[in-house]
Every structure is written in structure tokens, then in C-alpha cells.
């Protein structure tokens, strides 16, 4: 009887453990924006495989020099073992006309490791897969980027600049989690600039606001004029006549969702008038309905001797942490691709 009881307790422990992966799963490995493609080499080097490679090999938009969106690795399906299956971002390609009638993609969280994303792309034919990659290029890039942004946002929740957070609350009654190294600041009645205060690799977060006059304010010309006005007044250069400006030819705007609400993203390049400084920036413009204003939060980089992809993305993650006065909870950045939920009936 004791022996039977022991077996039942052991089985119960296994079931409970199976419901809580964090108790025995390893953490995902790899650096941010690394992607492992599981696809046999013959297919990877064929036209349909090259189509997926071309998707992942695109440049990060609006940087002063070419920098790839992702670090790409590839492995044969037979070599996809317990060493490789703990990669943080995995794309598994399955092409089989006997199993699939159309090309679809779904993702799974924490399939082989914690904090992992596995994207499955299933297709009935090589040509349909190739066409699917071409047609859905931006969706795939956006999905992987958003998942990395969510990871960064979660990291910033745990460790962030208390100086920036306190000033954002004091000036704008908002909450924001900025990188810990942003400790220097300049503030005015309706303006905040925090930075790491280094001559190279300068990271900065800027906040300002203006009255909300209606949906017509969300256009490139209007928002650029507001940006230039705020920067000229608050961030002058070392000498008279020097001030920050927006490179309007290298700026794009697009609507996005932040915390489930409408926002406008502006992304591009800035330069210092009458000086040789410049770099990339990205900003979010959001409506604070309680105070009838537009709150702007921006990250910009000055790093002439460094690659800027990681720097600007680190600041961009901070933008998604901004909580307006009426917001109580943070919502994950929506992935834009269907999630395949695991069967948890055994855990209920």
C-alpha cells in the first residue's frame, strides 16, 4: 500500500511539474534579435529558402548606415536537438502537400525554453512558401521585432532609471521606465531630457506635450513642427545658432497601438543646425484624454563611432513603457500573428 501511495505521489508531482515549465525548463539562449531557422540546407539555398533569408536580412529602417534587422542562423532539421532548440527566436519551416492546403504561420511561447518564441510556417509547396514570404515580409519582421520589444519592456520593469521615472511623474504625471544609465537631466515646465551624458554613445529620452486639437494633428508636417519647436527651445547647441532639427526627408510616420490605444510613431534622422552632429530618433505621440493633450516621448542617439541598431532599439523599448495618467495597467505589444495555445486541460 505504501508503495502504491509513493507511485501516485510521484505521478502527481510529474503532472504538476509539467504544468509549470519554469520549474525545469532552461532559459532561452542567444542575443536579442538572433533568429534560428530550422530548414534543410538544400531548401535554405533554394529560391524559396532565399525568400525567407531576404525577409530576415532587411535593414533596420531610418538609420544613418545599413544595419541588419536580425542575426540569422540556420540548421538542418536532423540537427535540431536539445542544444539548438533553446534559441530565443526560432522559425521552423514545414513544406508538405499531404499535410497542408495553404500557407499559414502561428507562434508558440516557451515551447522548449522559457522566454522563447517559436514561429511555425507551414506550406503545401515551395513556390507558395516563396510567394508567402514576399507578401508577408513586413508582418514577419514586425512580429519578431515586437517580441524582442516585449522582452526589453519586461527587463525595464525590473531595472530602470529612478531619476527619469520621478521626473516624468513630477512634470507630466506619467510613468516611464528608461534604461538605468539615463541619470543626467534637464527639465522645464513642460519638457524633460534625460541622458547617460557621454560624449559618444549618447542615449537620450525626451518628453514634451502640447494641446490636443483633434485627429488632424497626427500628420508628419504638424508633428515635425512641434518637435522642431520643442528641441530648438530646450536643446540648443554649444554656440549661438546651433539647435536640433528634424531631417524631414528621412522621417516617416505610421499609426501604431500602445496599451491597446491609438498612437502615432515617428521615426527618422535628426541633425544639429550649423554643426556636424546627428543620428537616429524614434518617438510616440499619444493622446492623454484626461488632460486633453498629446504627450510625446522620444528616444534619440548620438554615436558617430558606433553601430546604432541596438542603441535605438533599447530606447524604443522605453517608449512602450509610458503610462498616461488614466492608464492603470501595461498591455503587451500585440504580435500581429496568431498564437497557438498549448493544451493545458491536464493542468486544470
Image (cartoon, grey):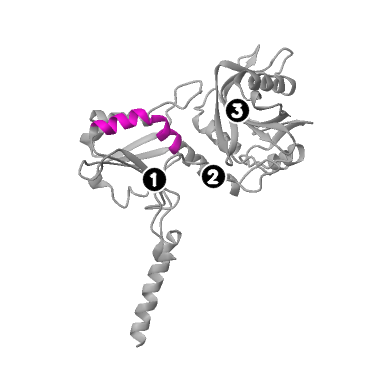
Left or right: where 175 falls relative to 281: right
Provide the secondary structure element on which disc 1 rests. Answer: strand
Q: Crowding at label 3, few (<14), some or many (≥20) Cα neighbours within 10 Å?
A: many
Q: Are circles 1 and 2 on residues that touch, CB within 8 Å?
A: no
| Rendered location of residue 320, percent (x, y) | 58, 39
Residue plotted at (39% across, 65% down): 346
Residue 338: quarter of image: top left
Quick one: 285 or 279, which is closer to the camera?
A: 285
Mark 3–mark 1 Cα distance, whole angstroms, equals: 32 Å
Label 3, secondary structure: give it. strand
On screen, residue 221 versus residue 115, left or right, reads: right
Q: Residue at x 39, y 45 (%)?
A: 107
Q: How far, Cα to Cα, is label 3 from label 2? A: 23 Å
Q: Which residue is mark 2?
A: 332
Report the span colored magenta.
Answer: 127-144
Q: Point out the image quarter for the N terminus.
A: bottom left
Amino acid at each position: 500500500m505504501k508503495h502504491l501511495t509513493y507511485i501516485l505521489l510521484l505521478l502527481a508531482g510529474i503532472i504538476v511539474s509539467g504544468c509549470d515549465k519554469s520549474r525545469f525548463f532552461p532559459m532561452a539562449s542567444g542575443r536579442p534579435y538572433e533568429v534560428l531557422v530550422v530548414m534543410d540546407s538544400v531548401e535554405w539555398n533554394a529560391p524559396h529558402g532565399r525568400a525567407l533569408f531576404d525577409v530576415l536580412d532587411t535593414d533596420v529602417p531610418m538609420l544613418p548606415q545599413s544595419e541588419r534587422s536580425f542575426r540569422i542562423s540556420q540548421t538542418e532539421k536532423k540537427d535540431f536537438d536539445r542544444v539548438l532548440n533553446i534559441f530565443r527566436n526560432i522559425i521552423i519551416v514545414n513544406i508538405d502537400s499531404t499535410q497542408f492546403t495553404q500557407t499559414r504561420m502561428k507562434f508558440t511561447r516557451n515551447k522548449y525554453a522559457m522566454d522563447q518564441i517559436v514561429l511555425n510556417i507551414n506550406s503545401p509547396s515551395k513556390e507558395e512558401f516563396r510567394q508567402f514570404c514576399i507578401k508577408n515580409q513586413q508582418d514577419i519582421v514586425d512580429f519578431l521585432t515586437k517580441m524582442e520589444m516585449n522582452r526589453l519592456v519586461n527587463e525595464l520593469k525590473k531595472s530602470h532609471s529612478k531619476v527619469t521615472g520621478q521626473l516624468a511623474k513630477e512634470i507630466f504625471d506619467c510613468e516611464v521606465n528608461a534604461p538605468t544609465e539615463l541619470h543626467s537631466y534637464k527639465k522645464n515646465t513642460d519638457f524633460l531630457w534625460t541622458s547617460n551624458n557621454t560624449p559618444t554613445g549618447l542615449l537620450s529620452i525626451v518628453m514634451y506635450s502640447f494641446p490636443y486639437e483633434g485627429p488632424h494633428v497626427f500628420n508628419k508636417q504638424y508633428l515635425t513642427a512641434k518637435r522642431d519647436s520643442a528641441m530648438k527651445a530646450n536643446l540648443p547647441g554649444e554656440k549661438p545658432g546651433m539647435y536640433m532639427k528634424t531631417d524631414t526627408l528621412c522621417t516617416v510616420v505610421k499609426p501604431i497601438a500602445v496599451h491597446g490605444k491609438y498612437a502615432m510613431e515617428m521615426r527618422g534622422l535628426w541633425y544639429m543646425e550649423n554643426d556636424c552632429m546627428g543620428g537616429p530618433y524614434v518617438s510616440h505621440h499619444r493622446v492623454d484624454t484626461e488632460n486633453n493633450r498629446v504627450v510625446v516621448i522620444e528616444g534619440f542617439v548620438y554615436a558617430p563611432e558606433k553601430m546604432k541598431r541596438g542603441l535605438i532599439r533599447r530606447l524604443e523599448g522605453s517608449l512602450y513603457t509610458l503610462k498616461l495618467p488614466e492608464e492603470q495597467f501595461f498591455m503587451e505589444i500585440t504580435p500581429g500573428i496568431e498564437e497557438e495555445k498549448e493544451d493545458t486541460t491536464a493542468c486544470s
